[in-house]
Image (cartoon, helix red, strand yellow):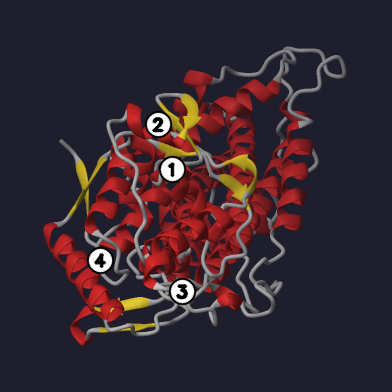
Amino acid sequence: MCKVKIDGETLTIEDVVKVAREKVRVVIAEEAKKRVKRAREVLEELVEKNHPIYGVNTGFGALSTVKIPREESKELQMNLIRSHASGVGKALSKETVRALMLLRANTLAKGYSGIRLETLETLVEMLNRGVHPVIPEKGSVGASGDLAPLSHMTLVLIGEGQAEYQGKIMSGKEALEKAGLTSVELDFKEGLALNNGAQLMTAIAALTIYDAENLIKTAEVATALTLESLLGIVDAFDERIYKVRPHKGAIVTAENIRKLIAGSKLVQTGEEAVKTLHRPHDPYTLRCSPQVLGAARDAVAYARKIVETEINSATDNPLVFPDDETCLSCGNFHGEPISLAMDFVGAALTIVGNISERRIARLIDEKLNNGLPQFLLHPKVKRGLNNGLMTTQYTAAALASENKALAHPACVDSIPTSANFEDFVSMGVTAALKAKQILENTQYIVAIELLCATQAAEFRNPEKLGKGTRKAYEVIRREVPIIMEDRVLSNDIEKIKKIILKETLLKEIEKEGIKLN
């Protein structure tokens, strides 16, 4: 049986996707269990010696000057979770909650948080048995971590709050009981260990990055299909060009497009284009697509490195260092690395959508599309009575414009909290949520380009398409027939978006022996 092992060191974005979407079982590595136990032992020894430790025998935030006696430590941790469960708005999706739970469990398994092993094991079993806390989407400023969302997660662990179990919303206590689990009474440091960290923004980031990588590949497929439908010029994709300006993303994008159009009878060289189109090269949306999509690739690759570092990091405060038998206060909960990375991803995907929308506009405009019918109207239907794909560009334009507003960076903002004690925050969840929305908008834009490019290919003869683009055409045509008379186009767009989400297009192209990097 497939399972994901957590040890605080080796979790990947692909693992997160498996657990979040495929509900793969999670197990704690034996070495991680030993580290968790040892950290707890050291923390207990420090508490017995009455060492002053933030959040263990003191209050929180601006209240950290208040000393808390040992006999009140359990109440302190329970109150922390209850008071910080102040999120608002719609509930997070199940896949985001599952990713959040996995990431919190993984950072605890690293062995620097001082949590009891049985508490960690209960959190993992909640995940395995499908007890999903109901967590409001908003309320985190991204330091001290995602306090409100993680507190809502922890409420269910202690038998409070609400949870989804087997498709029904119920109390956390009832959900645990139905799943055969017992609620946890938090001991010293455990509330802080559970709600102090950047796991919500990182959960959203991990899923968004995975989808963004697939979307950029899909955008390359759409670009290749548009290139052929517009009788594009292949010179701009020549390998030699990218050796003299060797940005990795551009090299990969150009190579992918060359693979997709291999064998095409529609594209032409610059020399041929001078005779047929009376120009030696194409407009930027075609000619510069490797430079643009490649830059987006590089941005997402950067974000992947940041996120995969984060998901295997210790992020709460204070941290226990068992080898040195000490406990140190720190700022590892601060979400700035993820906030900046996700603003970068949001900007990159906005650009992917922008250039796709411009290619859509070119495909439907008879003044720009090299002889295709206006709005890609089929010649057998009455022009004027039918509108063709005219308004698909309206939708793409609306989405592209919304993306531009969303792309304003969240990471540059900060509002002090906790009576100015927590005086610089990351707004990381805002950055992650914006990037996620931009991703969805851009998936729709690329779906529209695929719809238009497939329709355009009908007028060029699909048999003349390259090997990869021909397969893309066939996959889309299985779901979306040629557009003759006017029909509701939103249904077609949704079908193609679903093909993108399920990676059907990329998988089918790969079956043809075309591996897109």
Query: Whole-percent x and y of residue 15?
Result: 30, 50
Q: Label 2, on which residue? A: 175
Judge from the rendering whether residue 395 lies leftward or rightward of residue 52; answer left or right.
right
Query: Whole-percent x and y of residue 206?
Result: 44, 55
Could you classify mark 4 by the number of other residues whose Cα lies within 10 Å: few (under 14), some (14-19), or many (20 or more)?
some
Quadrant placement of the C terminus:
bottom left
- Work out how far the residue at label 3 is from the one at label 4, CA to CA, in angstroms: 34 Å
- Work out how far the residue at label 3 is from the one at label 2, CA to CA, in angstroms: 33 Å
Q: Earlier in the sequence, mark 4 or mark 1?
A: 4
The three-letter code of the residue at mark 3 reads Ile
Q: Earlier in the sequence, mark 3 or mark 4?
A: 4
- Position of 444 relative to 114 (above/below): above
Q: Label 3, on which residue? A: 68
Query: Whole-percent x and y of residue 441?
Result: 64, 43
- Work out how far the residue at label 2 is from the one at label 4, CA to CA, in angstroms: 31 Å
Determine the secondary structure under disc 2: helix
Judge from the rendering whether residue 7 lies leftward or rightward of residue 427; answer left or right.
left
Q: Label 1, on which residue? A: 156
